[in-house]
Amino acid sequence: MNKPTKDKEKQNREIAERLIQASIVHEEDLMEELGTSSGGLTDIEANKRLVQYGKNQVAHEKTPAWYVQLLACFKNPFILILLSLALFSYIVDDDIEAVVIITTMVTVSVIITFTQEFRSARTAEKLKEMVKTTATVNRQAKRKEIDLELLVPGDIIHLSAGDMVPADVRLVHSKDLFVGESALTGEAMPVEKLDTLPRGASKLARNRNQLTPTNALELNNMCYMGTNVISGSASAVVVSTGDHTYFGSMASTLIGKPPLTSFDKGVKSVTFVLIRFMLIMVPIIFLINGFTKGDWMDALFFGLSVAVGLTPEMLPVVVAGNLAKGASIMARNKVVVKRLNSIQNFGAMDILCTDKTGTLTQDKIILERHLDINGEEDNQVLEYAYLNSYHQTGLKNLLDVAVLEHAELSDVLGAENNYSKFDEIPFDFNRRRMSVVLEKRGNGHLLICKGAMEEVLSICSHVSDNGQIVPLTPERADRAQRLVNSLNMDGLRVIAVAIKQMAATDEPYGVKDEQELVLAGYIGFLDPPKETAREAIRALKDSGVEVKIITGDNAAVTRKVCKDVGLTISDIVLGSEIERLTDQQLADVAESTNVFAKVNPLQKARIVRVLKSKGHTVGFMGDGINDAVSLKEADVGISVDTAVDISKESADIILLEKSLMVLERGVIEGRKTFGNMIKYIKMTASSNFGNVFSVLVASAFLPFLPMLPIHLLIQNLFYDISQLSIPWDHMDKEYLRKPRKWDSKSVSRFMIFIGPISSIFDITTYALMWYIFSANSIDQQTLFHSGWFIEGLLSQTLIVHMIRTEKIPFIQSRASMPVLLLTCAIMIAGIFVPFSGFGASLGLQPLPMEYFPWLVGTLLCYCVLTQLVKKWYIRKFNEWL
């Protein structure tokens, strides 16, 4: 682990410890420590602290200016090499033709790359906007609204339903407070927050230096920046602001240069293989021609032309074209590709780590079960729950909303018309239940209570068993608890429903009346999986991608969701266990484990990092603040339509539709993109190696240059133009079945074994021109140049069809129409050049018609031998592209 990463993790641990300490001390001690009081700070003190702590805003990266992005496109080593060669040609020999050809190649490459990157970088910066709002604070003992950025530690703030928590705060007073933390923790259910000290706080406060590694996000008297108030109200003291908040600490880890992805490493490795090859071969060719021909200046420019020929100058264009085409196809599938390189990483991905809430699940609470005490479906229980939720006047939480929505799909809708409301016993956090009292046409009163299982069971004396009211014995209570535990293990949050029939009275009802109730049954709630989750996971598995669940939610809920989406659990590792493991141990565990629960954001990122260290290409899909660090750490970060802004900011790819099948389509598109890129690299590398080998042989034995520098440049330009259609080519279905990664050794091996094939036929062409057509003197060198120019260009162009598939080209696998048309056009143009005035100006001449039967025979033999070597190569190395 590098030093910046260690420093950031140390800072994050310190922030977590600070939050824990703030939660365990008494309110008076914390106020004294923060130098504040219930009346809040004075304006003067607040301004001092604003200078000391800075504004309450989190770190974020700015999109670079357009000219910075344009200059970055020139950082490609091949672009720099070509520009250097062009400059050298102009200064030393005033070679305008060479300069024009080379700069044309560079300009096309840079324009395409810049255009795509500029468009994708225009995604608006959302992170800062998240905290662009106001907060209600006490200043000089008066309530006032201030810009959220002006909050400082020690401020007393007031929260109510709908508010976003503006900083990390310790609750001073709270009433019926529920906070949604799913964006931060992954927990779908709202969390109950209290203004009381956690259990054992006094002991911990006395031993602050011996704090146990408690999860800072599980403190029930702390609220965190970026979460939101679902219901209730509270006042709190600000403990941390800006980058010193839990949210801010995660945002700060997103700043700076992102880690190298699989794509970056792959391109870099292949690039330097080709550059090393160039640095070896070009000096050899220069020296051989210099010594054998005696003209060192001609030898120098011929060597430079060979260097241009060896440079895959269209690599940036072909890569950008492939990525742009992939982005265009994915855009039609409602997928935003923010970083083009991520498309190839999608195809190389062999492990997909995904959060649960909001990605595999809908991040929406629904009523899943309504059961009697025996665990059987019971509409009467649903009706009681519906009447309770319908008639309560307090702010309806997500569970009440789920009950009401479910009732609309059942026959209990309208039951409220049979009752009139008489009274209500509101919810409070001590009782953890609420009751309504209804009157039914003069038939007395019906009290309906729903709440936490333990609290409701404690006020019941009877149960409803198949319509019979029977006493609640210890055995029945134990059976009821076992049933609820079983439902909890299935990932359901269970609420008990109880009733009480009473005679009508005019007296108001209170907590004292919640006694001797009849337990009617239970209602169970669930955050259900997305409809396409099961199908998507199966499709990814069939494509060689292993799915791992990494969530902040608990193990029981996670197990249920995994079961629902068809994911077989090998083991569940908890965050508390991860803390005890070294990176090497965690890497071994992460490879063999597919479910991680109760993990914090930094642990998520650590799992992604150690999997990458094992050589995997790792994708991460998440939608919450707690996923932002992992999204950036992964080779490809995937966010979803409902994600918070910081996750969209960190992601490489954003899914705009609910269907997760987009994932599988993205993987296939990524593999197509990679396949077409690797085609170009292997075609160019092998063809260039063959040409250099041919030039080496010719330079050693011919009394003249085998081809003029301008011939090499024109031939190379034609060949490169023929490659521009590759992004529109097909890939064989067999190739798309498994992940594909960059492998520089594979490129080197391919170049060495396949490249010399063309040299064999180049040498036969030398012999043909020398012995058959008598182009064996300096006076006849233009004829020799013309013969090799056509044969070299046609064999180079034909190799496109030979290399693009493992199968027999034109018969078992045919290239796409753009590839066929463009390669045919280039071959025709290449044959025409020596017969044109343009060719004559370059020092070429028309060839006799007797040359062309020899050319056809040469090309046919070339194709047959290449196909035979291809079959041997696939058997030997079990790969082609």
Image (cartoon, rainbow, N blue to C red):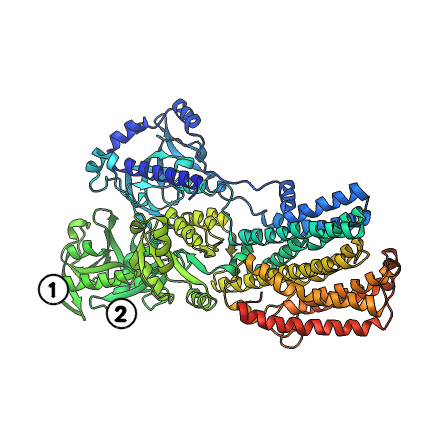
- Residue name at image x 81 percent, y 46 percent: 95
Instruction: Give the spatial CA distance, label 2 vs label 1.
Output: 22 Å
Query: SS of the residue at dot 1?
Result: helix
| Residue count near mark 2 (Cα–Cα under 10 Å), binned few <14, some 14–19, many ≥20 | some
Q: How many marks?
A: 2
Residue 853 appearing in the image: yes
Residue 81 lies, with reference to residue 486, above or below; the image says: above
- Report whether 141 appears left or right of 58: left
Q: Quadrant of residue 443?
A: bottom left
Q: Position of residue 323 (x, y in %)?
A: 60, 57
Which part of the image, by quadrant, shows the N terminus? top left
Q: Which residue is mark 2?
A: 377
Q: Which residue is mark 1?
A: 475
| Amino acid at circle 1 | Glu
Q: Are marks 2 and 1 in contact (CB under 8 Å)?
A: no
Residue 622 appearing in the image: no
Q: Nearer the viewer, mark 2 or mark 1?
A: 1
Q: Residue furthest top?
A: 44
Q: Position of residue 165 (x, y in %)?
A: 38, 41
Which residue occupies the foreground of this view, 333 or 84?
A: 84
Which residue occupies the foreground of this view, 458 or 714?
A: 714
Which part of the image, by quadrant, shows the C terminus? bottom right
- Residue name at image x 28 percent, y 27 percent: 32
Which residue occupies the foreground of this view, 337 or 852?
A: 852
Q: Residue furthest bottom?
A: 811
Q: Position of residue 197 (x, y in %)?
A: 23, 39
| Amino acid at circle 2 | Glu
Q: Quadrant of residue 880?
A: bottom right
Residue 60 lies, with reference to residue 769, above or below; the image says: above
